Amino acid sequence: MMVHGAHRLDLPGGDHLELGRRALVMGILNVTPDSFSDGGSHDDAARAVAHARLLIGEGADLIDVGGESTRPGAEPVGVQAELDRVMPVLDALAADGIAAPVSIDTYKALVADQAVQAGARIINDVRGLQREPEIADVAALHGVPVIIMHWDEARDRDRDLVSEMIRFLEQSLQIAERAGLSRQRVIIDPGFGFAKTLDENYALLRRLGELHVLGCPLLVGTSRKSMIGRLLDKTAGERLPGTIATSVLAYCAGAHIFRVHDVGANRDALRVSEATLYGPPAGS
Ligand code: 9MG
């Protein structure tokens, strides 16, 4: 069985990521007041760097830094407040010479621009370039890839979710293309949990493979989300087994990158999945 398309993702600075059979794990580094660090003080930035090192030690291939919570009910933050949270952390990660590429989780063009100048090498836009389309110009200017996530609160709920998602992501791809970003620089993401019901989230997981029609690598983020918590009646801290089940199922449907809190456990589960689909690595 061959389910993983092979993609080469060029990063600024001459590096690249190979996306294919080997799953990549993106560790989550939230710098918000409801996380372990809000990035605002020197100690917070140091704590964030220590956490990034821990994630890399557990096997993270990428670190995703975000300063605005996307949890339902979370207050939106302004540009300056978001910069105040993420910039000290990005500067500290760069000064530390952190060993994995960093992505910036933002839909704001100004934040993305500053973050990339401070060393972020991927833009993770949960609004799929559609909240501030100028963010695509920032990505094109600096030559950084973008993750375009589906989050469409205005979607027609009488229509098929996956068809609507493909239409939304095609619009995002058009915005990228108009800015001069080729499809080779784009990763798509179905946005588990974003304006979707429990049934829709599981239908999406079941039908994930349909998104390959867009020809882009696929990132999924299910880690500790309410689609797991509501199903199992578990708190956020108790959702790791459910998260692993979704990671493995998404991998078997051809997903390439997994955005998670618990890097080590997901990495192990994905290595077992890789060996099952394609055989263990030579010499193991
Ligand atoms: C920031 N953020 C929260 N959930 C996410 C998900 O599922 N995908 C991406 N790309 N970012 C997310």
Image (cartoon, grey):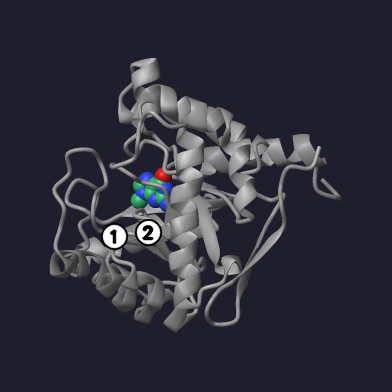
Eyeballing the image, is 131 above or below 117? above
Residue at the (14%, 65%) spot, across then down: 81
Image quadrant in which the N terminus is located: top right
Image quadrant in which the C terminus is located: top right
Residue at the (17%, 65%) spot, across then down: 40
Instruction: Quadrant for residue 17, please give it.
Output: bottom right
Task: Indicate the secondary structure of the residue bearing disc 2.
Answer: strand
Number of disc labels = 2
Label 2, ligand 1: CB separation under 8 Å: yes
Q: Residue furthest right?
A: 283
Eyeballing the image, is 271 above or below 64? above
| Residue that badge 2 annotates | 125
Q: Residues within 10 Å of mark 1 (few under 14, many from 20)?
A: few
Residue closest to the eye, 23 or 79: 79
Task: Say whether residue 125 is visible.
Answer: yes
Eyeballing the image, is 161 above or below 92? above
Residue 28: x and y, percent?
A: 39, 51
Left or right of residue 75, residue 57 in this image: right
Q: CA distance from mark 2 to mark 1?
A: 9 Å
Q: Amino acid at mark 2?
A: Asp
Q: CB under 8 Å between callouts 2 and 1?
A: yes
Residue 197: x and y, percent?
A: 35, 27
Instruction: Quadrant for residue 172, please give it.
Output: bottom left
The mark found on residue 131 in the picture is: 1
Residue 165: x and y, percent?
A: 46, 43
Left or right of residue 246, residue 131 in this image: left
Residue closest to the eye, 214 or 238: 214
Task: Indicate the secondary structure of the residue bearing disc 1.
Answer: loop
The mark found on residue 75 in the picture is: none
Q: Amino acid at mark 1?
A: Arg
Residue at the (35%, 36%) spot, across then down: 156
Task: Say whether residue 41 is visible.
Answer: no
